[in-house]
């Protein structure tokens, strides 16, 4: 039985209480369980333990980060989670430091990952419309994709030697939501990639 670990990176704000991210995690859990996965989840907005999180990362065959996009990145509790858990994992649980050796200190940076063969997926909720991406005429992203915007997160998982599954995104979730269509796309996305 494969193992999936979902990290819900939502942080509560009055204008965004987290219902959508929570529902996406619920639906992922339900669908992956039906496909034969054992699924565990954590919320970075609640209590968590560094050593337990390292064990969950080692246990999982696939890690899913479900996150709203706050100022082009993760909410601050997820950044704290990463700073504490991923830093603790550098001593071998997730990677062997940065992969370089004293014999070749200028070679192999980032190649010390210990999670070879494991996969990850980013699942994101945006206030930005889909049309804001991949279009050079758009003001903010200037033709950049969602994965371009989230390159630092992809590099974090590559640092652990993990392989990316295609990113899933819900767009315009506050000003022009299409939630039922997003749920249908999510079902199809999981069906194609798991």
Image: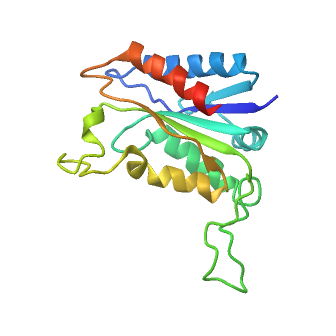
Instruction: Find the residue positioned furthest to the top.
Output: 180
Determine the residue positioned at 54% across, 20% down: 187
Task: Decide: is 125 above or below 154.
Answer: above
Q: Residue 159 appears in which quarter of the rendering? A: bottom right
Q: Position of residue 75 (x, y in %)?
A: 43, 38
Task: Note whether residue 43 is visible.
Answer: no
The vertical placement of 128 against 113, above or below, is above
Is 33 on the left-hand or right-hand side of 77? right
Image quadrant in which the N terminus is located: top right
| Residue 149: image location, x then y, percent | 38, 49
Residue at image location 29% in from the left, 27% down from the top: 172
Nearest to the observer: residue 47 or residue 150? 150
Viewer can see residue 62: yes
Direction from residue 3 to residue 22 in the image, left or right: left
Q: Point out the residue furthest to the right here.
A: 1
Query: In front here: 23 or 137?
Result: 137
Image position, residue 16 (x, y; %): 36, 22
Give me the residue at 64% from left, 18% from top. 31
Indicate the position of residue 145 as horizontal and vertical percent values.
36, 47
Is 83 left, or right, of 124 in this rendering?
right
Q: Residue furthest front?
A: 192
Q: Residue at x 71, y 21 (%)?
A: 35
């Amino acid at each position: 039985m494969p193992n999936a670990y979902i990290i819900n990176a939502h942080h509560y704000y009055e204008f965004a209480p987290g219902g959508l991210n929570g529902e996406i995690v619920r639906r992922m859990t339900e669908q992956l369980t039906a496909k034969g996965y054992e699924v565990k989840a954590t919320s970075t907005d609640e209590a968590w333990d560094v050593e337990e999180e390292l064990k969950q990362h080692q246990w999982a065959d696939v890690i899913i980060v479900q996150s709203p996009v706050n100022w082009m990145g993760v909410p601050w509790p997820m950044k704290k989670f990463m700073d504490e858990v991923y830093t603790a994992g550098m001593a071998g649980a997730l990677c062997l430091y940065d992969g370089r050796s004293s014999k070749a200190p200028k070679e192999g940076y980032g190649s010390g990952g210990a999670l070879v063969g494991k996969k990850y997926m980013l699942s994101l909720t945006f206030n930005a419309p889909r049309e804001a991406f991949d279009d050079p005429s758009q003001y903010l992203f200037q033709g950049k994709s969602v994965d371009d915007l989230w390159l630092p997160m992809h590099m974090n998982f590559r640092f652990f030697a993990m392989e990316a599954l295609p990113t899933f995104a819900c767009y315009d979730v506050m000003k022009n939501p299409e939630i039922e269509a997003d749920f249908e796309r999510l079902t199809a996305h999981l069906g194609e990639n798991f």
